[in-house]
Image (cartoon, grey):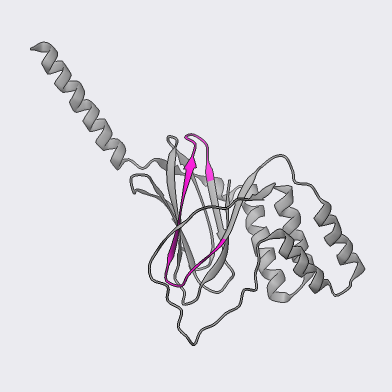
Amino acid sequence: MFKQILLGAMMLVSVSAFAQEQNQPAADVDAKATSDVAQQLALANQLVKYGYDTKTALPLIQAVQIYKKLNVTTEAREKASEGDAKQPDNITKTDVVSFDEAKILEDATTFAAGDKNLLALINDAKKASRSPVNGVIRHSDRVNAGCTDIYTVRCRGGESTTVIVSGDGDTDLDLYVYDENGNLITYDNDGSDDCVVSFNPRWTGPFRIKIKNLGRVYNRYNMLIF
């Protein structure tokens, strides 16, 4: 009888702990979003947009230099989507901003217009090797108007994760992070298409990153994870 009572109590504690885990967010918000690395990456993204907006080569070159310094490497990621694409027939756009380093330097060469000093810097940027430290994963994609792109990433418990998203400047993007139980961990919905969040997982597991486009045209964005 005592064993049955003890077993029942243990099962009750186990079920209660599981329920608490389901309701307890799997991560805490982390201040790393304002770290030096995060600020440098956000600056690089801004330099890309500024360089394309003004058609000047130097900001594009500087952005590539930062990406290589922080060992930013491209990695294709599968995504799911929510929402219905909404792009009225009277609204059109062409891709102007690129976050691909080879394309950035190609366009910088065009903007340099034969300037020897700028061309030399571009050539140096092409030859520069990546730093072996501070590895950052990059994925560039486009989210349709009125839609949400969803990525699942596996994060290690006790290790801070930072996500930075920068769009092409045409619409407002919002960034949300959820744990595997659907708990909202952190978000950035400040009214621009530049977002940054950091969180510290309590255990190793999958997290969902949602990038929501609030505009009426698609937005091409650069997502950085480290």
Question: Is 141 above or below relative to 38?
Answer: below
Where does the magenta region start and end?
141-161
Furthest toward the left, the residue is 1
In the displayed image of the protein, which residue is found farthest to the top?
2
Q: Is residue 111 magenta?
A: no
In the rendered image, residue 169, in percent from the top left (x then y), is placed at: 58, 71
Q: Quadrant of residue 82?
A: bottom left
User: As drawn, which residue projects farthest toward the right?
Assistant: 116
> Where residue 122 sits in the image (x, y, percent)?
83, 61
Depth order, front residue of 75/209: 75
Q: Residue at x 77, y 72 (%)?
A: 56
Q: Point out the image quarter for the C terminus.
A: top right
Q: Residue at x 42, y 73 (%)?
A: 85
User: The N terminus appears in which quarter of the rendering?
Assistant: top left
Instruction: Indicate left or right for 206 with 32 as reference.
Output: left
**Horizontal and vertical percent position of residue 36:** 65, 48
Which residue lies at the image location 81% right of the left edge and 56% below the top edge?
125
Counting the numbered discs, the total is: 0
Residue 226, above or below 122: above
Which quarter of the picture shows residue 24?
A: top left
**Residue 157 located left or right of residue 116:** left
- The answer to whether 142 appears left or right of 88 in the picture is right
The x and y percentages for residue 23 are: 29, 42
